Image: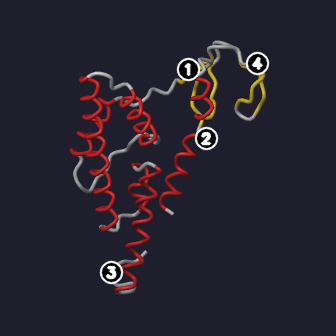
Amino acid sequence: MFDLLLTTTRVIYDLKSVKVAVLKDLGKFPVDGDVSAVSRGQEVELPRWLAKKLSELGVVEIRLRPTTPDEVGKYLISEKNVGKSSINKLRDDFYYEVRELLSRVKSSSVDADSAIAAIRLESNLRDFIRLRMNKIINLTVLNTTRERIEGNLTIEELVLFKMLNDLLSSWLNQLAPKVLRSE
């Protein structure tokens, strides 16, 4: 079930629109629900999956700035600094972007320096994900309301928070109905 929900989040990100600069005339093309002429030099929004394919073909340039390894390090430091019961806001597509980043970095690891950079990125990501996961678990145990932290969680993290909350509530209600936790 959890795997299906996480796969669904990837589909959601692929369907979200991103801005692209058109590098070659596309002719009549569906954009924003309408079919219109799309010419070189225009900036339009396309679903991410389509923008990626057209970008690979050199037809468009995606205007969304990708996440960098340095940003991952900064996110890790920032998350460590806010304390155990607080959680920083991330880009909505953070995990989607870092998967792409890790793939790019690993595929370009041809020398020792780039291999070390890939290892450092993996280490920072692992630490960051564990830190966020621990905070989400802690916030669930503390019976934090979803509304209090929802704006700071990505979709993947919201899925985790909701499932942990439901599981913990069910478990507690089996042990001592309505005594330990009320929702």
Cα distance between the residues tagged 1 and 3:
54 Å
Q: Earlier in the sequence, mark 3 or mark 2?
A: 2
**Circle 2 — which element?**
helix
Image disc number at residue 27: 4
Cα distance between the residues tagged 1 and 2:
17 Å
The residue to which callout 2 is attached is 15
Q: Is residue 33 left or right of residue 126?
A: right
Residue at point 27% right, 51% down?
131
Cα distance between the residues tagged 3 and 2:
41 Å
The residue to which callout 3 is attached is 180
Residue at point 34% right, 65% down?
140
Q: Amino acid at mark 2?
A: Leu
Q: Amino acid at mark 4?
A: Gly
Residue at point 28% right, 62% down?
138
* Residue 89 on image: x %, y %: 37, 44
* Residue 156 on image: x %, y %: 45, 52
Q: Earlier in the sequence, mark 1 or mark 4?
A: 4
Cα distance between the residues tagged 4 and 2:
22 Å
Q: Earlier in the sequence, mark 1 or mark 3?
A: 1
The residue to which callout 1 is attached is 61
Q: Earlier in the sequence, mark 1 or mark 2?
A: 2
**Circle 4 — which element?**
strand
Q: Do the residues under discs 4 and 2 have CB atoms within 8 angstroms?
A: no
Q: Amino acid at mark 3?
A: Leu
Residue at point 31% right, 68% down?
141
Q: Nearer the viewer, residue 8 or 32?
A: 8
